[in-house]
Structures are given as structure tokens and as C-alpha cells.
Amino acid sequence: MIFDSREMAQLRRLEILASRVARGQIHGHREMARAGPGSGFREHRAYQEGDSLRVIDWNVYARSDQLVVKEFDAEEALDVVLIHDRSRSMEGAAATCAAKVTAALGAISLQRLDGAIWIPCGGDRSGSESYRGRGRLNDLLQTIDVQASGATDLLTPVQSQLPRAVRHGLAFVVSDFFDPRGAAQSLRFLLSRRFLVRAIQIEDPDALAPPAPGRYKMRDRETGATLKIDLTEEAIAAYQRTREARTRGLRAFCRKAGAGFLRARADRPFFEIIRTAIARGWFKR
Amino acid sequence: MVQALAVQFAFPFGFWMALAAAGVLAAHLVRRRARRIDVPFLPLWAATKGQMRGGFGASVARWLDLLLILLAVGAIALASAAPFRPGRPSSVRDLVLVMDGGLSARAGDRLDRLRRVAATEIERRAPNARLVVIAVADAGPQVWAGTDRARALQAIAGHAAGWTDVGWARALELGVAAGAKLKRPDFVFVTHRSWEQADDAPQRWRQRTVRVPVANAGVHALEVVRDPESGGALAELGLHGAGVLVIERVGDGTELWRGEVGPRPVRVPFGGVGEIALRVRSFDASNADGFAPDDTVYVRLPAKKTPRVMVVSDGDPSAFLIAALQAMAVVGAVAEPLERIAPAHVAEAVERADYFIFDRCAPSTRPTRPSLYLAPPPSDALPFRVGAPGPAPALFEVARAHRLLRGIEWERVRPGTARPISSGAALARAAPGVVLAAGDDWVALGFDPEAGVFASSPAFPLFLHNFVHGDAADLDRAPEFWRIDAPPPAGAPGGDAMWTIRKDNRTVRVGPRLWGAPGFWTLESARDHATQRIAVNLLKPDLDLAPATAESDPLADVGRVSIPDQPLVPHFAAAAIAALMLAWYAFWR
């Protein structure tokens, strides 16, 4: 179990918080962009042949002698895709934090009767896991573990493991986005599949903090590539600028694409990160 | 320029400090060794490196701290080696030249040689060297100071010898006073003679400085004049000077002449052939040897004719004597035929003989030619008095090595009693009896040639030969003198080893500077350039004589010009400190 008892209690409070915000009932809580069976009135439209008589708004007909039908927002149980980066670059606090955030997101989804699809990227698992119903919550929490191995590659697992039937929905990407092929590749793919994309960037401040000035031979955790560098104050400042620029670029991409972006420190408690996501309405229909 | 920039090191072992550079280099390399760290995302650092400054500037900055440290270490090592820039040697800088101006320099080609030596000394100076030329002559001390070498050479060329009524002490005082105004000048004393080299010379200089009356002039010139009447066999010395003069033979100190001399030359009869040496000394009124530059003159007279020997005897001469003379005549040692006369005819035969040998007889009047008396009877005409024979030989102070006495079997000699009446001319003396005495022109042998075995021995003709050809003087030179053009004899004072003068806790070596340059004498110190100061102390430190006379160059700047040793330790120490401070400010602050 990735959570201890105290964290489990915090997780339950998060579930309640998410429920209050979304006010969802039994058919799921995701607000879809198309009309369909649901409880929320959407609009009137002219009656068409074949429409059920039950959907005719007879009150309007009595007042205006026109046959119109009421349309409601479609409500359906959706799958929440959890893309979990377990690459070597996450090693340390980032891996733990990412695992807990992913597990909490899955727990909230199951609590709200949504399906949860966990796609691990890296680590010793290659296949995705699907969960539906509150009864699978324990399985989900047992499955998601803390691992950090292999290279960062978010796109390939998503492309290969995302079920074709799942064409839209909510996708959480929990990663440091240290993808050599580009941080936005996986996000771009999900957006193309009409997912609502929520990117959570986990950063380990200890791992990312530059060392003291000096001469270093740096080795990439994932690829083993090395680089010699004379680290000066000037170089450290340049490094910090590069890092911030990379994050700003990712944030700008998400904003432009309508995706959510949350930057979180790995030493931050997971429930605070989830609470921030809830506060941003990422679970709101 | 190269010489000016040359740096010498007083403590070369200080360079071992440079080995610390190896430690510094090793520490730097260890410190700069790349540490291995794992990073989550290397492209982030690669992008960072791409933004960093590169190229030569970055490399310099990377190694600048090491360079600064190595510079500091190098500077410390250099400072430890005690570097100093040597002062410019005075030999190429300033010169105080004291020229011999006495009339004695006129003898032969002395003056020309002195001028050549002085000119050479001047020409080898640097163009900007300060020159002080002091010539002492009858017109008084002439001092010229300036930097114009051409004018200095003119002063040398126009220098004429004359009366030196101020003497050498005065000249030295002038030179020292001039040298004191310069810095480390060469002090060159160009003279035709070797300076006094007696062991107590420095002390005598000091005394001379204290007690030098100018009126107490000495003998300054000797002129050799050939006697035309004697065909060069006789010579006279022309003496110039003032005071009482004494001419004595070098070696035994035999006084040959004594008399008053004045400003006009006097001629002293002097006889002899071959090469002889005389020392002429002067005395002041108090008869003290206060200021008397002893001079040695070498006179080369032409070879004389074959000596004519006249045998004087009352009866038949000794057969041994005749046989010896005839043997000498055979080899050309004496002229033939041998003449024999009675003592009464000596005065008439003076012109017919060069030497007289009295065989057991005494002349009625003494001949003016060198004479040999063999066992003479008492007579007032003898230059000595003959006493009664003693019981045994009583000889002392016999120069057995004297060539006149070589071959004499002294054990067989019967002594007589005699006393020389001429002062200081006897070669062998006996008290109370004299067996042999030799003066300038006479030799007495106190035994009968017919009574002893000596006359029959081969030594007898040799004795006669020595008498005829060796004259009465010897060629021994005074050990404390030597000729100008000859190197000093080994072991002579001031020759191989320079004198050492210790004064005021300073040690100064004084001695000849260049053996190859005749007449060169200089006073120089080994290291502390205190020669002139020492010399001032020796002569007259409070003498304020400026090298400024009518002959001086008014535009000449006679001042301190030479550069003493300049220690450079502070420079390198400051460089090390600066390098360390810069490194600290740039890298470690």
C-alpha cells in the first residue's frame, strides 16, 4: 500500500471534497460536450421525426403551439486516464510523490464511479490497468507503486496502451516531463484524442538543485550519457534560467491547448497537490 | 642595456623554493578534477553549457588562478634567491687618473709609454664616464675633470713632465679628493716606476700624509750622462731636486755619494760598467726619512775595453800571480802584454792601465784606478790600515757567496789586522783583522800569494777575473724593488697577494690591478666600494680639494654617477603579494 493510515484519511477527505465540488450522482460526474441522456437541461430544438414523444416540451407547445423537444446534457460514466511517469529521472522523492498523486487521482475517480485507466510509463510494468467501481479502489492502491527505472517516454506507452474505445475523457499526466523527444509530445497526442488533459509536473528540488560551483562530470540517470562542465555561478544562473524556460514553455503549451498545468514540488504533500487540482476544477463536470 | 638588466642572485639556493610550484600544481589539478554526479536530465545541463562563454577567454579564466599562484610561487622563489642588480663596474664608468709628472718620467721613452697607458685607460671608459685627470708637474697640480674623452686625451698629450714640487702625496690627495666626489671610480696611478712595495708601505703613507712639508721635496729625476772622456766607461748622474741627497748602492747600502742639491742639476761622478743599480734617497733638514720616494735607476753602460792590468811589485812578482794573469790573457780576459812597474812609478802609469795589482807592496800615491792589494805592507797610501797578524782567523760578515770571494778556502786564510777607512764599501770585514776588503775601486787580499796554497789553486785566477770584470759592485737587486716592465718577483710584498688594509671595520685590498699593464696601480676594494673612503682616511680625509682648476671643464657634471648594487628582493616579494591578493580577490573571496 502506497499510503499509510494517515494518508488514507487524507485521501478520503479529498474524495469528499471532490464530490462536493462536482456534485455528481450515480452516472458519473463528467460533463460531456455533447447532448445526451442526462439530468441537466441543455436547450430546446425543433421536433424531428423519430424523436420520442416523451422529450416534447408540452408546456411550450401549449403556449406557442410549436413542437419542441428538450435536450439534456449527456451524462455518462467516463474513464480517467492516469499516465504515470516512472522513469529513472523521477528517482527519489519525485517518484514517491508522483505515485501518490497518481493513486489519489485514481481513488477519486473510482469514488466518483468513473473508470480509471492506469498507464505506467517506465518501471517494470508495461501494460495498463483498468479499474471501475469503488470496489476496485483497493486493487488500484495495491497496484500503483513507487518505481523509477528506464528512460522517460510518455508517448509510446500512451499510444500503445490507451484503449481505442476510450476516445475522450479526462487524462492526467503525472511526470517531470524530462522527455528527450519533447515534453509536449504525449500531451499533444492526448489532445488529439479529444481528452481533457491535465498535466502535473513533479519536480524534485533536491535532484534538480545545481551543485556547488566546480568542475563536474555529469551523468544522465536514464541514458548514462556524460557531460563535463565547469560549473560557475554564471553557469548555475544559466541552468536555472533554462529550467524555468522549459517549465514556462510547457505551461504556455498547455494554456494554448486548453490543458491544465500544475507544477508541484516533490516534497509537497500529495493531498495539497490534489486539493489544488480540485480547486482548479479539474474534476468538475 | 643587457648589462643594465642583468640580475644576479646572492643566494641561488633560494630557487629550491620553486619546487613548491609542483605542489601547487598538483593541488590545483586535484582540486580541478571533475566530480561525477548523476543528474535527472542531462539535456538541461547541455543546454546550459551551450549558453556559457567559451573560447580562449574562458580557458584563461579557468587557469588564471593557477597562473597567479604559480606567479606568486615564482616571485617568492626569486625573492628567496636574493636577487640584485649589480652596480655598474667602475672600470667602465668613472676614472681618476693620476699621471706621473716628475722629471724622472722623461728618462727614455717613459713619458710616451705613460701617455699610451693613460690614453688606453681613458679610451676604454664608457662614453659618459666622468674623467678626472691629475697631472703633477712643475706648474703645480693640473686637474682636468669632465666627460669629454677627446679633451682628456688632449690633456694627457699636452702633459709635460717637470719639477714635481708637490710630490706624490699631494697628487694622491688630489686624486682621492676628486674620487670622493664620484661613486666607485677607478683610481689609476700611472707612473713609470713601481710604487714602494715595502711591507710597511701603507703605514708610511699614513705618516706621509701627516708629515708632508711641501718644501721637503725629494729627488725626482735622475739623468744618466755618458762621460765622453772615458768612452762611456764612466757615467754621471744628473740630480734634480732639493735637500741632501745620498746615492747608495742597492743591496748592501754602500753610500756612494752625499751632498746638497738644489734646483739646478748637479753631476755626480760615477764609475762602473755593465748593469748597475743605484738608489738615490733624499733627506730633509732633520735628516729624517719623511718624504723620500726611493728611486732605482738601472744604468746600462757599454761594454768596456779589454782591461789592462798593471802589476806593481818591489822585486820579482809572484809566479803564481803572473801565471794566473797570463792564463787570463790567453783567454782574452786581460790585455797583453802584461806590464810590470815599481811602486814609485804608479802615478806615471795610471793612464796605461785600467787595473793595478800590488804584489806585497804599497804605492806611494794611490792610483785612481781599481786596485788589488795582495798582502800589502803598512802604508799611508793604502785605503785601509794594516795591523799585525792575529793568532787565528777571525772572520765574520763575510759574504761567502759573493763572486769575488768564491773559491777562497777560508780555512787557510791567515787573518791580518786592518780596518777600512772608506765608509760602507767593504765586502768582507774582520774584526780585529781584515783579510779581504773591497771598495768601489780597490780590493785587498790579506795574504801572501807565495806563502799559501790559495795562489796556486785554480780559484786564484778566478778571483782575479772576478776582480777585473766584476768590478766592485754587485748586481743584486733590492728585494723590495723590481723594474717597471717586469712582473713582480714571486713572494714580493704586494705582488702575488694584495695588501690588506683594515680600518674602521672595513677591509680593503690594495694592490696592482693589471700585471700586464706596466705602471698601473689602483686602489680598489673587493665588494663594498669603500676604497676611496679608505684612501681618504689614509691620506687626508678632511682635505677639501675640488677637481676644479683653470683646466677644468665648467660644464662637466662631476657627481655620483655609478649605480650601486640594487637589491630586488622587495620587488619580487611585492609581486608575490600582489599575485596572491589578486588570486584571493578573483577566486577565493
Image (cartoon, rainbow, N blue to C red):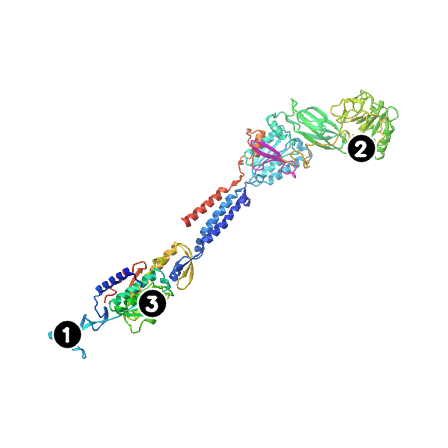
In front: B147, or B182?
B182
Give the image location of residue B499, x and y in percent: 62, 34
Q: Quadrant of residue A40?
A: bottom left
Give the image location of residue B412, x and y in percent: 82, 27
In which quadrant is the N terminus of chain A drawn? bottom left
Give the letter of the chain under mark 3: A
Q: What amino acid does circle 2 point to?
A: Lys
Helix, strand or loop at mark 3: strand
Helix, strand or loop at mark 1: loop
Determine whether, in the image, residue A1 is placed left or right of residue B386. Answer: left
Q: Which residues are magenta?
A: B499-527
Q: Which residue is mark 1?
A: A57
Report, in whole angstroms, how far the alpha carbon at label 1 lies from the one at label 2: 182 Å
Give the image location of residue B339, x and y in percent: 86, 28
Q: Can you say whether B27 is above or below A277 in the image?
A: above
Q: Which residue is mark 2?
A: B305
Number of numbered markers = 3
Marks 1, 2: nearer the viewer: 1
In front: B491, or A47?
A47
Mark 3 and mark 1 lie on one chain; the one further toward the N terminus is: 1
Give the letter of the chain under mark 1: A
Q: Which residue, as the protein is rendered here, is positioned at the far right?
A: B316
Marks 2, 3: nearer the viewer: 3
